[in-house]
Amino acid sequence: MRAKLVVGNWKMNLTRPEAASCVEALVKQIDSYEDVEVGLCPSYLSIPVVGNLLQGKSILLGAQDVFWAGSGAFTGQVSPSMLKEVGVQICIVGHSEPRGRFGKLEIPESTISYFGETDQTVNLKLKALLYHGIVPILCVGETLAEREAGKTDSVIQDQLAGALDGIDAAEFIAGVVAYEPVWAIGTGKTCDTEEASRVCGMIRTHLAKLLDQDAADSIRVLYGGSVKAANAKELFRAPDIDGGLVGGASLNPEEFVQVIRAAH
Ligand code: PGA
């Protein structure tokens, strides 16, 4: 039986004092469930503050991204050992935003190449995280245009194959995959439960092909994209959805607590 996992992705929100108040409010209200794990991914700068407040609590400390090299001339990057040193346990990789695939924001063509994540860089980051014992949350998902062209499954299968190239079942067995349809991120449009569950099931079947059945049965497959208190219960009840990666709703402790309760 896979325990549910609910992870807050704070993206580029909350200053350090705001992050601290959010965690304080959250830990006051949160119940601890044996069948639900919770994680928080603040900005790099807030990780130490959040980590201090989570000392002795069962909430997992996370990061939103990482670079693959150990150290060196990589201005602006943060290495896996730097994350490890501040106590990071989980890390998002391959989110659609660093891939330059946005659900709502209009990014001008001239700056989109700034968001240059590819399946190859995701693969390098995954390997680096696994080497350092940080649990990766690998994000995959289709844009609206890809969905309308009937390419949802093939896009996701290609993302999984690219990300997991050269990684074996034993290495990724504790890993997490998040299905995040790009068109549902930050837009208020949730993928309907039946379709989200179908895609999460398809991801598990494909993981069995790329890795093996044992790994596929153990890996948590989350849904992300406008998860909130109002829809979390229905989504998390689906047999193939093992929890959620939650953006906007995780910034509000009252709302996020409701989402966590819904996973219990
Ligand atoms: P959202 O973001 O919940 O605000 O749609 C989810 C995510 O991008 O991880």
Image (tube, helix red, strand yellow):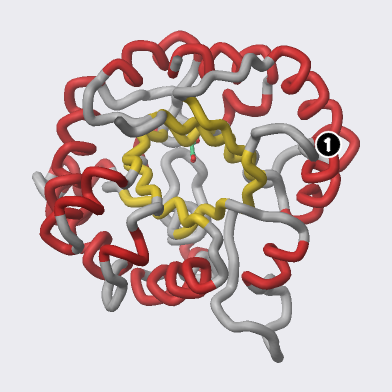
Task: Name the residue located 35 percent from the left edge and 24 percent from the top edge.
Answer: 190
Q: Answer above or below: position of 81 versus 55.
A: below
In depth, the one of 76 and 92 nearer the eye is 92
Question: What is the total number of numbered labels drawn onto the structure image?
Answer: 1
Please identify the quarter of the rendering in which residue 230 is found: top left
Give the image location of residue 171, x and y in percent.
36, 66
Task: Name the residue located 43 percent from the left edge and 59 percent from the top edge.
Answer: 94
In depth, the one of 51 and 33 nearer the eye is 33
Give the crowd class for mark 1: few <14, some 14-19, many >=20 residues within 10 Å. Answer: some
Please identify the quarter of the rendering in which residue 82 is found: bottom right
For the C terminus, the quadrant is top left
Q: Answer above or below: position of 151 versus 34.
A: below
Q: Which residue is mark 1?
A: 53
Task: Name the residue located 58 percent from the left edge and 23 percent from the top edge.
Answer: 249
Give the image location of residue 139, x and y in percent.
39, 51
Extreme residue in the top direction? 230
Amino acid tagged 1: Leu
Q: Answer above or below: position of 140 versus 55.
A: below
Give the image location of residue 65, x and y in percent.
58, 60
Task: Name the residue located 47 percent from the left edge and 67 percent from the top edge.
Answer: 130
- For residue 101, side relative to residue 57 (left or right): left
Give the image location of residue 213, x and y in percent.
15, 52
- For residue 124, side relative to residue 64 (left or right): left
Please identify the quarter of the rendering in which residue 119 is found: bottom left
| Mark 1, secondary structure of its residue | helix
